[in-house]
Amino acid sequence: MINQNEDHAKIIDVFAHTLPTQLKQKVLAVAPDAIAPWMRQPLLNDIAADKDSILPGQAEILSAVNLNPEDYMAPNEAADVTRQANEALISICQQYPQQFAGSVAMVPMNNVPEALKIIDDDVVHGPMLGIQLFTRALKKPITATEFQPIFQKNGRY
């Protein structure tokens, strides 16, 4: 994707993943085997190195790796950890705005009411650009009836 402005064109990578430390620690506390080998890739865990690897004229839209709290935690805990991960993504983007043009929010798919609040707090009224959804959540397709409120809310914005 290219963002055109008066000065120059910037290439934006919209599929850039990171593994916020808070998310990693919280999930490992309840599921020690949850971290797949590829999640140990240094750039996922070292924002300074990731930032330094971005070429001039490029930026990233950050998203968390596919390590979803709802797969390991009860609904309220998943919502809390999801909010912490989103705060980490927001902080990274605020700290390094030249390298990270924005981020997308995680939402706890096992807690749809909290997912809707996160959309309001972090996307509609906050700095995040949208939400990250996977094609399956909780071993169900994201088209499952229970997830429809998330699509209905996003359809309004």
Image (spheres, helix red, strand yellow):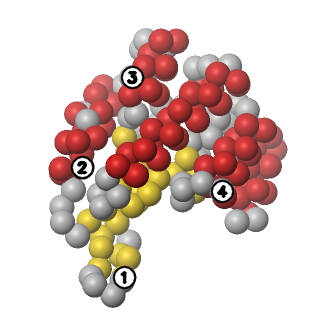
* Residue 42 shown left or right of residue 30 in the figure: left
Q: Which residue is drawn at 19% across and 42% down?
A: 49
Please name the residue that numbered disc 1 is placed on: 4
The secondary structure type at the circle numbered 3 is loop
**Quick one: label 2, few (<14), some, or many (20+) residues within 10 Å?**
some
- Residue 95 sits above or below residue 82 on the image: below
Q: Between disc 3 and disc 2, whose residue precedes?
A: 3
Q: In this view, does 29 lie to the left or right of 154?
A: left
Check disc 2 and report the residue beneath it. 51
Q: Is residue 41 shown to the viewer in this render?
A: yes
Determine which of the numbered discs, if any, sits on residue 35 in the image: 3
Q: SS class of the residue under badge 2?
A: helix
Tell me the crowding category of disc 3: few under 14, some 14 to 19, or many 20 or more residues within 10 angstroms, Cα based: some
Residue plotted at (74% across, 45% down): 116
Marked residue nearer the N-terminal end (4 or 2): 2
| Residue 92, percent from left and from top | 38, 45
